[in-house]
Image (spheres, rainbow, N blue to C red):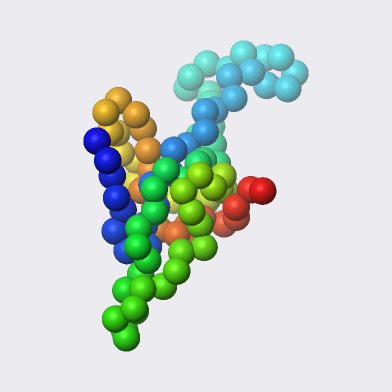
């Protein structure tokens, strides 16, 4: 299934949570924090402006990004978990 976000929305695949701490302690699933980092899978065409044009998004497919804790909505598509969020919820692109 192909997903195309609308307006200034982006589809993000969250990176996997660390299973082992730096000290070597194995974390159970319930103790893992959800990472605030992911990869952009798809982007919308941009927000529609008053003059009828669209604003250009600052992120693109494949970018590694950091986003806010409460960003977006979790969705499950074909057994894969993603997030759909506003571009404004993205704080930085990791280079």
Looking at the image, which residue is at 60% across and 55% down?
Answer: 92
Residue 25 lies, in percent from the top left, at: 67, 14
Residue 49 lies, in percent from the top left, at: 34, 79
Looking at the image, which residue is at 38% across and 43% down?
Answer: 83
Q: Is residue 29 left or right of residue 22?
A: left
Q: Nearer the viewer, residue 33 or 44?
A: 44
- Quarter of the figure with the N terminus: top left
Q: Nearer the viewer, residue 80 or 56?
A: 56
> What is the quadrant of residue 44 in the picture?
bottom left
Q: Is residue 90 left or right of residue 7?
A: right
Q: Residue furthest left?
A: 1
Would you say residue 8 is visible in this rendering?
yes
Residue 81 lies, in percent from the top left, at: 36, 32
Would you say residue 36 is visible in this rendering?
no
Q: Residue furthest right?
A: 23
Vertically, is 84 above or below 81?
Answer: below
Residue 73 lies, in percent from the top left, at: 34, 46
Q: Is residue 60 left or right of residue 66?
A: left
Q: Is residue 30 left or right of residue 27?
A: left
> What is the quadrant of residue 21 in the picture?
top right
> What is the quadrant of residue 18 in the picture?
top right
Looking at the image, which residue is at 46% across and 48% down?
Answer: 61
The number of numbered badges drawn on the structure is 0
Q: Nearer the viewer, residue 42 or 32?
A: 42
């Amino acid at each position: 299934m192909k997903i195309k976000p609308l307006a200034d929305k982006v589809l993000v695949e969250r990176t996997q949570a660390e299973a082992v701490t730096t000290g070597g302690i194995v974390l159970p699933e319930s103790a893992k924090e959800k990472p605030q980092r992911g990869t952009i899978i798809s982007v919308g065409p941009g927000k529609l402006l008053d003059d009828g044009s669209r604003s250009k998004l600052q992120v693109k497919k494949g970018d590694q990004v950091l986003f806010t804790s409460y960003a977006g909505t979790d969705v499950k598509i074909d057994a894969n978990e993603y997030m759909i969020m506003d571009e404004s919820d993205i704080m930085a692109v990791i280079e």
